[in-house]
Image (cartoon, helix red, strand yellow):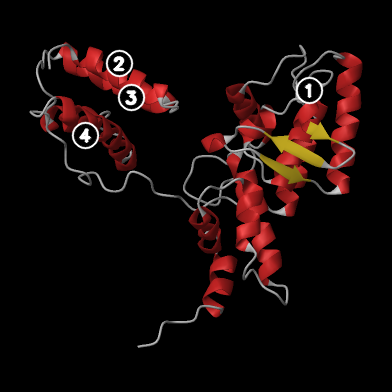
Amino acid sequence: MKGTMHTKVQAYLARRRALGYKLTKEGLLLLSFARYSDRRGQGGALRSESVIRWASLPRDADPAYWARRLQTVRLFARYQAVLEPATQIPPRHIFGAAHRRKRPHIFAAKDLRHLHRCASRLSGKLRPLTYRTLIGLLVCSGLRISEALNLTVEDVDFDQGLLRIGQSKFQHSRLVPLHPSATRRLRRYAQCRSREFPRAQYFFVSDCGLALGYFTVCRVFRGVARDLPPSNDRPHVRLHDLRHTFACRVLLKWQRSPQKAKGRVAILSRYLGHTRLRDTYWYLTAVPQLLEQAAKHFTPPPL
């Protein structure tokens, strides 16, 4: 099969995207590999040596990052081998596992109060209330930040106390019930937002009335949380740690109840929008308290 690596990668991405895959990050990585390969004049079929050399860049990166780069091109190589039999598929685990879940940071109650105070001191007219309400919603609902930012005005049902999450991660939709106290806070924010921007389409907006950008929100949150040291090996606490905090708190509450968490993890899994139950069970090993409780109720198989 003739053509540059860039042409081959573009054809692969077009085919996969036509099937419904977004391949946003993967696409950027594959195009980076294609440019690297073409610059080095490595025409012809894909070679494992070239993939491994590219995947191990930059030299001072985490091996898990190298593994993810290798995995992305390896999937492309498997596809390309059908069209071009001379294609070499690089070995799978030379850099270790591509996905290693790190221990999450769990916010204490005093940390959440600190976030609330710092968000209240942000500049702007609506901005302090926007971030206070957004952080509060993430804490009490366990939403992904992308789901919260994509909420439209119509997605929030105050009468029923429900959020309609449409086409979130993995293209799934779901209803998220809220506690009445959360509904009251959201209603108060909506009233303030409507006075400033009566035609707003998104529920959470900037001081210009536009949808909040993901990277902007992450940057603001990092400033709000800069005085909170992470309890894991990450450089700073993350917005996603609010979702982890919600899930772990729910499981801890259930584990301490007479019924325990047995038979209830599936409920939490659906509430969080997980597609695989094992992603929810992971939380049972995420913090020492949950791991200890889970170990107490573990029944070893018969010998």
* Kind of residue sitting beneath label 3: Leu
Residue 10's mark? 2
| Residue depth check, mark 2 versus mark 3: number of the one nearer the observer | 2
> Sequence-wise, which precedes: disc 3 or disc 4?
3
Kindly state the secondary structure of the residue where label 3 is placed. Answer: helix
Q: Which residue is mark 4?
A: 78
Question: Are discs 1 and 3 less than 8 Å apart at CB?
Answer: no
Q: Which residue is mark 1?
A: 127
> Sequence-wise, which precedes: disc 2 or disc 3?
2
Q: Which residue is mark 3?
A: 29
Kindly state the secondary structure of the residue where label 1 is placed. Answer: helix
Give the residue drawn at x 76%, y 30%: 155
Q: CA distance from mark 1 to mark 2?
A: 41 Å
* Kind of residue sitting beneath label 2: Gln
> Sequence-wise, which precedes: disc 1 or disc 2?
2
Above or below, 178 relative to 248: above
Kindly state the secondary structure of the residue where label 2 is placed. Answer: helix
Res 266 → quadrant: bottom right
- How many numbered callouts? 4
Question: Between 274 and 136, which is closer to the camera in this rendering?
Answer: 274
Q: CA distance from mark 3 to mark 4?
A: 16 Å
| Residue depth check, mark 1 versus mark 3: number of the one nearer the observer | 3
Res 217 → quadrant: top right
**Relative to residue 59, is residue 287 drawn left or right?**
right
Q: Residues within 10 Å of mark 3 (few under 14, many from 20)?
A: some
Question: Going by the picture, which residue comes out furthest to the bottom?
Answer: 303
Res 248 seen here: no
Give the residue drawn at x 75%, y 20%: 205
